[in-house]
Image (cartoon, rainbow, N blue to C red):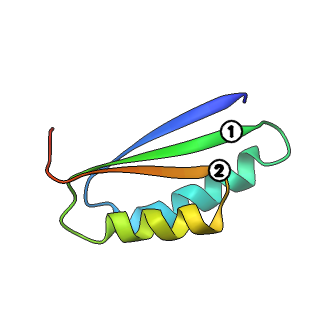
Amino acid sequence: MDLSIIVPVYNEEESLIPLVEWIERVLAGEYTFEVIMIDDGSTDDSWKVTESLAAKYESVRGVCFRRNYG
């Protein structure tokens, strides 16, 4: 593994798909990498989007906190 990209997430449902698509486009074929999304108690659908991205992309993983820790 060349890179581990940590993405802090808090109410970012609209930006997650474009972000992951950009990361995949830029890094695929150049590096081995993982994208770890840390949802810090979002109140929108950020976690659902993260789960769908993890199902679609092998490189994406997620962690979800029940409440916001700041």
- The circle drawn on residue 11 is none
Under circle 1, the secondary element is: strand
- Location of the C terminus by quadrant is top left
Image location of residue 22, percent across then percent down: 63, 56
Name the residue at the top extreme.
2
Task: Classify the position of the N terminus by image quarter.
Answer: top right
Residue 50 position, x and y percent, is 44, 62
- Answer whether labels 2 and 1 touch (C-beta < 8 Å): yes
Residue 68: percent from the left, percent from the top? 14, 47
For the point 22% across and 59% down, the residue is 42
Toward which corner of the image does residue 3 lie, by quadrant?
top right
**Label 2 or label 1, whichever comes before in sequence order:** 1
Q: Is residue 10 above or below residue 6?
A: below
Circle on res. 33: 1
Label drawn at residue 59:
2
Using a 10 Å C-alpha cutoff, classify the residue at mark 1 as few (fewer than 14 neighbours), some (14 to 19) or many (20 or more): some
**Mark 2 surroundings: few (<14), some (14-19) or many (≥20) residues within 10 A:** some
**What amino acid is labelled 1 in the image?**
Phe
Q: CA distance from mark 2 to mark 1?
A: 6 Å
> Which residue is at a point 78% across and 48% down the rendered structure image?
28
Q: Residue at x 54, y 65 (%)?
A: 53
3 versus 61 height, above or below: above
Mark 2 residue element: loop
Q: Quadrant of residue 12?
A: bottom left
Name the image quarter holding residue 15.
bottom left
At 63% from the left edge and 61% from the top edge, which residue is drawn? 21
From this view, report whether residue 44 is shown above or below residue 11: below
